[in-house]
Image (spheres, rainbow, N blue to C red):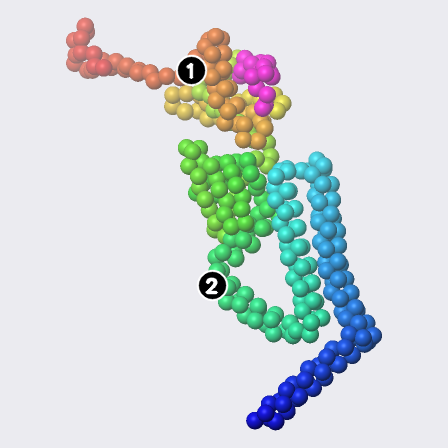
């Protein structure tokens, strides 16, 4: 029993000695340190190149949008900043994901199997979340194509109001009554953006049949030319009297148009109607109002002093 134990101890000591010799040989082997150094250098270079690519990419993206922000075609600075953040994040993810695959390859790990598994997983997630993917892609192109931005007055589907938030998945619109309309970006159909170009305030003013139309048009045109700039800062140019728009049974309708800043046509229209009413009252331009006309007809056989029918 003692002999067996001594033999096992001796064998263990020999194994330890052999392992120590192998470690000692490896530690003092120049080829090992050279290969290890090159391996560490390759890992270091992959990491440094990835960092440099991300930094340079971010700088180029910001430089591109800084030039665009200074151009006269700039529409919404907040929208441009959102686009910068999206592109920077996308570039960072792509570069560092590629760097991670390169590092795994240096460790002699088969990345093809990982990519195949990730592809199958992504396909499963894509089928399970098609609407989410559609919303995100639509949100990206809404921002990228500059369709509308925060603060724009738009009509989307059944909602009309001011855009208060644009996300990659949803868009929020503040309605006139204070409600917030939230629509997934994938469900946005036709979009009408009222804030892109100047608006037109269209006023239809009714006057009575007894009014001298030429004189009324002349007076109103003079009034429009003298609009005070401090009260109408949103008006561009001089409003125009177009003339008779229609002839109704009880009135003659005159049409006035005024070019305004985007979405200022409603406010300008209200002020113009108020001031025109006062001006027309002061200048004797009669506004139409309901009138009753009585016809008297003498019936055959009635007496000379009577028999009138109303």
Point out the residue furthest to the top here.
305
Circle 1 — which element? Answer: loop
Q: Is residue 227 magenta?
A: yes
Please, is residue 276 above or below residue 202 in the view? above
- Disc 2 vs disc 1: Cβ atoms closer than 8 Å? no
Mark 2–mark 1 Cα distance, whole angstroms, equals 65 Å
Residue situated in front as seen by the camera: 138 or 62: 62
Q: Could you tell me which quadrant the N terminus lies in?
A: bottom right
Of the image marks 2 and 1, the number of the one nearer the N terminus: 2
Circle 2 — which element? Answer: helix
* Residue 96 visible from this viewpoint: yes
User: Which dot marks residue 128?
Assistant: 2
Q: Nearer the viewer, mark 2 or mark 1?
A: 2
Residue 264 percent coordinates (x, y): 54, 27
Q: Could you tell me which quadrant the C terminus lies in?
A: top left
Q: Residue at x 37, y 17 (%)?
A: 289
Please, is residue 166 above or below residue 42 in the view? above
Tell me if mark 2 has few (under 14), some (14-19) or many (20+) residues whose alpha carbon lies within 10 angstroms of its own: few
Q: How many marks?
A: 2
Residue 52 percent coordinates (x, y): 75, 54
Q: Residue at x 69, y 63 (%)?
A: 99
Left or right, 87 with respect to 290, comes to: right
Residue 293 percent coordinates (x, y): 31, 15
Residue situated in front as seen by the camera: 150 or 161: 150
Q: Is residue 197 magenta?
A: no
Q: Residue at x 42, y 37 (%)?
A: 179
Residue situated in front as seen by the camera: 142 or 294: 142
Which residue is denoted by mark 1 in the rendering?
A: 287
Q: Which residues are magenta?
A: 217-235
User: Which dot marks residue 244?
Assistant: none
Please, is residue 210 above or below residue 187 in the view? above
Point out the residue furthest to the right here.
30
């Amino acid at each position: 029993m003692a002999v067996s134990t001594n033999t096992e101890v001796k064998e263990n000591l020999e194994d330890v000695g052999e392992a120590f010799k192998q470690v000692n040989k490896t530690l003092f082997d120049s080829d090992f340190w050279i290969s290890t150094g090159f391996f560490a250098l390759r890992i270091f270079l992959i990491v440094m190149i990835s960092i440099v690519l991300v930094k340079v990419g971010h700088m180029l993206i910001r430089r591109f949008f800084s030039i665009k922000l200074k151009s006269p075609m700039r529409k919404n600075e907040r929208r441009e900043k959102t686009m910068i953040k999206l592109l920077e994040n996308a570039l960072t993810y792509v570069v560092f994901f590629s760097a991670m695959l390169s590092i795994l390859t240096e460790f002699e790990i088969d990345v093809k199997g990982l990519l195949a598994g990730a592809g199958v997983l992504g396909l499963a997630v894509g089928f399970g979340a098609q609407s989410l993917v559609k919303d995100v892609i639509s949100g990206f192109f809404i921002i990228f194509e500059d369709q509308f931005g925060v603060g724009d007055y738009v009509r989307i589907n059944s909602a009309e109001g001011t855009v208060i938030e644009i996300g990659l998945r949803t868009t929020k619109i503040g309605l006139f009554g204070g409600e917030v309309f939230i629509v997934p970006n994938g469900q946005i159909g036709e979009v009408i953006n009222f804030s892109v170009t100047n608006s037109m305030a269209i006023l239809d003013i009714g006057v009575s049949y007894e009014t001298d139309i030429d004189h009324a048009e002349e007076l109103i045109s003079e009034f429009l030319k003298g609009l005070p700039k401090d009260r109408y800062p949103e008006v561009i140019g001089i409003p125009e009297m177009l003339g008779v728009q229609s002839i109704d049974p009880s009135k003659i309708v005159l049409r006035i148009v005024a070019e305004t800043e985007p979405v200022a046509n409603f406010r300008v229209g209200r002020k113009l109607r108020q001031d025109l009413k006062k001006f027309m009252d002061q200048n004797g331009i009669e506004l139409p109002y309901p009138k009753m006309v009585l016809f008297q007809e003498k019936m055959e056989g009635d007496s000379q002093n009577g028999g009138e029918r109303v």
